[in-house]
Image (cartoon, grey):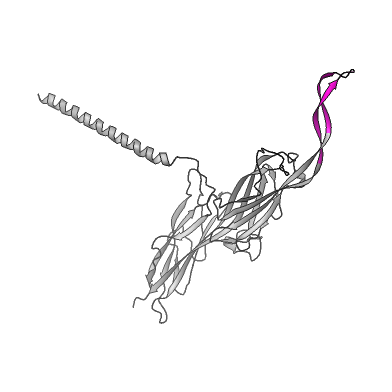
Amino acid sequence: MSKLNLSNQNSIFRIIFRSCMIFVLILSSLFIASCSGNNPVGPVNIYTGTQGVTVQFTKNNPPLEIYESSEMLILAEIWNKGAFTPDKKMYDEPIMISINVDDVYLEILGKPTDSIFAKDEYMSLYLSGKSTVWPIGEKTIIPIVSLKANKILGTRETPTTRIEISACYQYKTYFAESICIDSDLYGLEKTPICKNKNTYTYSGQGAPVIVNKMDVDMIPVGVVTDPITRSVPIVNSSGGLEGIGQGIEEGESIILRPNFRIYFQNAENGVILASNEIENPCTEGPASKGEAIRISAMLGNIPLTCARPEIKMYSNEGSVRCWIDEKDVPSQFELNRNYELPLKLEAEYFYKVTTIRDVRIMRVS
């Protein structure tokens, strides 16, 4: 009797358990469907935005008020939000972190850990940029340095002092655009494969220095003579048509040279450092004069010649004109032969960002 009751109870429990499991699976399926239905997973474009490496203080560190003779450990969040990841083989010190304080009010005590720089020294670190598998980039929170508030001199009750942390780094902007080699200068083609926009505008490529505009011109540079194959009727001695053959005659083609005016902008609050002949302005100090951005560009597999491979920035803006060298202009750039080619550009530069926190020093007595 007891076995029968136990068996009946187990059957009931199994039915209840299965029902619960089915209900949970249904709810899970509905939840997944509702999440994925409105947010389909697709490829991530990492070459957007205008940020590179950012630095900021952590929450409530340092505090807005500290007491004289007290000590504190300064923490900072360093985040590579851009699309460039420095190669350790090419960049010995890609991100340089430094601190600046007024030694009248604050004293740098030195290294809280082995990884922290002492006074007047830099700390370097590597952080990966955005990628398709890591779309937000790499960030870290690190202790920067230990500080001690000095005794307040004079009659001021609560003097205010400033703590600055800077990140100085070498970075790259990657830019790509599909360019229409629009050789239909006179608008004769009714259904062209593509059409030159003449002016292109952009909002960011995943770096603080961006290409924000580009003008594209197709400039005629000359006329060349080419052999042209034409169909030729073959007739017999009595004038009858025997067939169609191939004949060659000389023809002329207008050759075009694509020409580009590329505009750059410092889209963030940091500073582009002039380097000139200085190897690393982050450690040696920026040059008073010199070039700020070094560029290289290609149209398809043809290198572009630029008026200046290094660009000076004025009021956070600069531009350069680039073209295909005459000796590299291929025969494909002929009149009425429209097609697309990729334009690729790299811009390299040194960049510095700074975050500031004002702190009040309170008297103890």
User: Can residue 68 be seen from the camera position used here?
Assistant: no
Q: Residue at x 37, y 40 (%)?
A: 34
User: Does the magenta run of residues contain 242?
Assistant: yes
Residue 7 horizontal side relative to residue 360, left or right: left
Residue 55 horizontal side relative to residue 288, left or right: left
* Prevalent SS, magenta region: strand
Could you say where residue 214 lies in the image, as x and y percent from the top left?
64, 52
Name the image quarter holding the N terminus: top left
Could you say where residue 19 lies in the image, as x and y percent from the top left?
25, 31
Q: Residue furthest bottom?
A: 155
Could you say where residue 213 lies in the image, as x and y percent from the top left?
62, 53
User: Can residue 175 be seen from the camera position used here?
Assistant: yes
Q: In the rendered image, which quarter is residue 236 located in?
A: top right
Q: Is residue 318 above or below residue 84?
A: below
Could you say where residue 282 lies in the image, as x and y percent from the top left?
57, 61
Q: Residue at x 63, y 63 (%)?
A: 314
User: Does the magenta run of residues contain 80?
Assistant: no
Name the image quarter holding the C terminus: bottom left
* Region in magenta: 224-249
**How many marks do you count on the picture?**
0
Q: Residue furthest left?
A: 1
Q: Is residue 43 above or below residue 355?
A: above
Q: In the rendered image, which quarter is residue 299 located in?
A: top right
Q: In the rendered image, which quarter is residue 191 located in?
A: top right
